[in-house]
Image: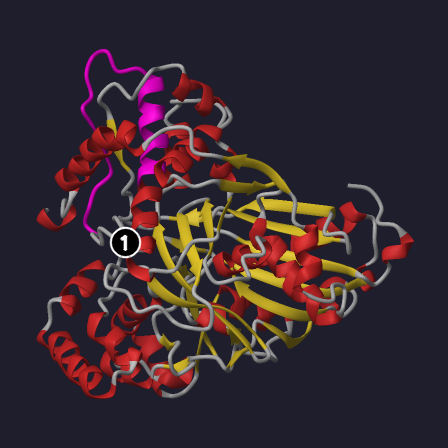
């Protein structure tokens, strides 16, 4: 990238984004420009069917390496970095020994399905039915939204709660350490903070905590009720701080100089901040490994019936921003799988391949390698192609995969509209798949709304940088940040819903055919 100018000395911000497939580090100047960067592919482990893990030691080594490489790429010294912000994939967790600092197991990924049977058992249990009934009564008498939320809650494999319960049930050494208060729990941000501070800080922020399913966003604390229900010792959880906070200093032995750690933020909330979705009704659509649709609900948590999840977007001092989120897990995952099968060579080819055929030829793809999330909510659904015939070409298959991305976007969009009743002001897209114009245009047509794609789509990193930079005065306020955001393309609706309705109806029929598949084995 070349050398950063001397005028930027000690006003540079370092941001690291630990995504689901790639770990990136960028050095930003006050103009919001990247002056140095580095990245590495995250090595995802699949030790057995349904299990998805990350090696903690390899991830730490990669983190250190990309920071060093980005500093070198920027042509600067480490002491020129004013602050560090860290964005991470969410709900991926680890437990370690408090005394020795040694982990008990690998990171358990948010995509992991080992607790699927436990989820099914709990969701059909008399205990949960009793909880639902009690909370309905409490809501009736108190009208408190947290009781309405509790009366509707069902467990999913994506939340930490039952995956953590599974670990405690199946790993005696973790259970024993937790009972002896010698166990530390952490999502990726917590583990990295612990390592960066040489074991002196065990903490997280509200955005990461709220994605675990163990944190009560209505009380802004870890849920003692849920921990008691699932037999999880609450002592294992870290203190929760503001998203923009003085988390400590990087130990000088790691990079040669201390760096203030001024922001920890979950990746989707970071992307929301990077997209400058600061106002109620702003929507962010991230299409990366998975698809995440978030709507800013102001300082009010949304209570969902169809599976949208109420989250803390960020907390900075007195400012609290809440989000409602729906997601689809297998967006980039499906596209990468197709590439590994040699359906195409380069992702850029998929757009032209999709446009080379007039339609999908009656082929429909169900993107369900890790189940189907809201509004379907079926962890046992299988991935499949439906309607294959001898005339089916690679272009038909690629088009069917891209169409499935847009159809899932439409499902999420309709759910957000139906559930929140908040007028949508802006829709902004990011993530690697947003670089595909076929998907973007079809999504705009299905929504009947204009979608704004920024010039740089790595919004999680930018959001972490904005949060860390605001904390040390690199940027003064959000109005200044809005001026730094640059649009690359506006996708305006060109087709009508009626043009797509028959195809989407057929695709939804394919979803039904794939439902509950693994539960029947």
Q: Is residue 384 magenta?
A: yes
State the count of labels. Answer: 1
**What residue did someone put label 1 on?**
374
Question: Viewed as shown, does residue 254 lie left or right of 205?
Answer: right
Q: Nearer the viewer, residue 247 or 97?
A: 247
Quarter of the figure that contains the N terminus: top right
Q: Residues within 10 Å of mark 1 (few under 14, many from 20)?
A: some
Q: Nearer the viewer, residue 390 or 185?
A: 390
Question: Viewed as shown, does residue 274 lie left or right of 112?
Answer: right
Dividing the picture into quadrants, the one containing residue 200 is bottom right
Residue 222: percent from left, percent from top: 39, 81
In the depicted structure, whether residue 371 falls above or below residue 203: above
Q: Is residue 402 magenta?
A: yes
Residue appearing at x 82%, y 42% in the figure: 2
In the depicted structure, whether residue 344 falls above or below residue 87: above
Residue appearing at x 57%, y 80% in the figure: 318
Residue 441: percent from left, percent from top: 44, 31
Dividing the picture into quadrants, the one containing residue 407 is top left
| Residue 51 in view here | no
Question: Viewed as shown, does residue 67 lie left or right of 299?
Answer: right
Q: Nearer the viewer, residue 437 or 268?
A: 437
| Residue 86 in view here | yes
Q: Which color scheme does this rendered protein use?
A: secondary structure
Residue 47: percent from left, percent from top: 34, 50
Residue appearing at x 53%, y 66% in the figure: 189
In the depicted structure, whether residue 443 falls above or below residue 400: below
Magenta highlight range: 379-407
In the depicted structure, whether residue 496 falls above or below residue 388: below
Indicate the secondary structure of the residue bearing disc 1: loop
Residue 290: percent from left, percent from top: 40, 47
């Amino acid at each position: 990238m070349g050398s950063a100018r001397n005028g930027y000395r000690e006003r540079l911000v370092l941001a690291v984004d630990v995504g689901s497939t790639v770990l990136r580090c960028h050095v930003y100047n006050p103009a919001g420009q990247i002056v140095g960067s580095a990245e590495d592919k995250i090595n995802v482990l699949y030790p057995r069917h349904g299990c998805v893990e990350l090696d903690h030691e390899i991830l730490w080594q990669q983190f250190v390496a990309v920071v060093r490489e980005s500093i070198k790429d920027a042509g600067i010294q480490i002491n020129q970095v004013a602050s560090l912000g860290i964005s991470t994939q969410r709900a991926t967790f680890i437990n370690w020994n408090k005394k020795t600092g040694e982990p008990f197991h690998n990171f358990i990924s948010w995509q992991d399905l080992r607790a699927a049977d436990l989820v099914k058992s709990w969701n059909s249990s008399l205990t949960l039915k009793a909880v639902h009934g009690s909370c309905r009564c409490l809501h009736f008498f108190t009208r408190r939204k947290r009781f309405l939320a509790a009366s509707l809650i069902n467990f999913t494999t994506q939340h930490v709660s039952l995956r953590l319960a599974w670990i405690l049930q199946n790993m005696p050494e973790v259970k024993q350490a937790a009972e002896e208060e010698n166990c530390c729990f952490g999502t990726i941000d917590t583990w990295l903070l612990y390592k960066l501070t040489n074991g002196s800080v065990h903490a997280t922020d509200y955005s990461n905590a709220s994605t675990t399913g163990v944190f009560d966003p209505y009380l802004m604390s870890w849920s003692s009720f849920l921990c008691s229900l699932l037999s999880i010792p609450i002592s294992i959880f870290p203190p929760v701080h503001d998203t923009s906070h003085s988390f400590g200093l990087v130990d000088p032995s790691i990079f040669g100089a201390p760096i203030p750690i001024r922001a920890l933020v979950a990746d989707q909330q970071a992307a929301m901040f990077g997209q400058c979705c600061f106002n109620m009704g702003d929507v962010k659509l991230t299409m990366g490994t998975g698809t995440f649709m978030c709507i800013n609900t102001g300082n009010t948590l949304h209570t969902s019936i169809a599976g949208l999840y109420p989250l803390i977007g960020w907390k900075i001092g007195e400012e609290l921003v809440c989000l409602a989120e729906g997601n689809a897990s297998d967006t980039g995952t499906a596209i990468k799988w197709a590439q590994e099968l040699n359906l195409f060579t380069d992702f850029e080819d998929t757009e032209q391949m999709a446009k080379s055929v007039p339609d999908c030829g009656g082929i429909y793809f169900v993107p369900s390698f890790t189940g189907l999330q809201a509004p379907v909510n079926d962890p046992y659904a299988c991935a499949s192609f439906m309607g294959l015939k001898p005339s089916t070409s690679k272009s038909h298959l690629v088009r069917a995969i891209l169409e499935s991305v847009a159809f899932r976007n439409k499902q999420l969009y309709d759910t957000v509209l139906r559930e929140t009743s908040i007028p949508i002001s802006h829709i902004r897209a990011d993530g690697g798949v947003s670089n595909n114009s076929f998907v973007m245009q079809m999504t705009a047509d299905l929504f009947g709304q204009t979608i704004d794609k920024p010039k740089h789509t790595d919004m999680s990193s930018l959001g972490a940088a904005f949060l860390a930079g605001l904390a040390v005065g690199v940027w003064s306020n959000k109005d200044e940040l809005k001026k730094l955001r640059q649009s690359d393309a506006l996708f305006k609706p060109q087709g009508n819903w009626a043009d797509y309705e028959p195809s989407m109806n057929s695709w939804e029929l394919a979803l039904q055919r794939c439902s509950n598949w693994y539960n029947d084995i």
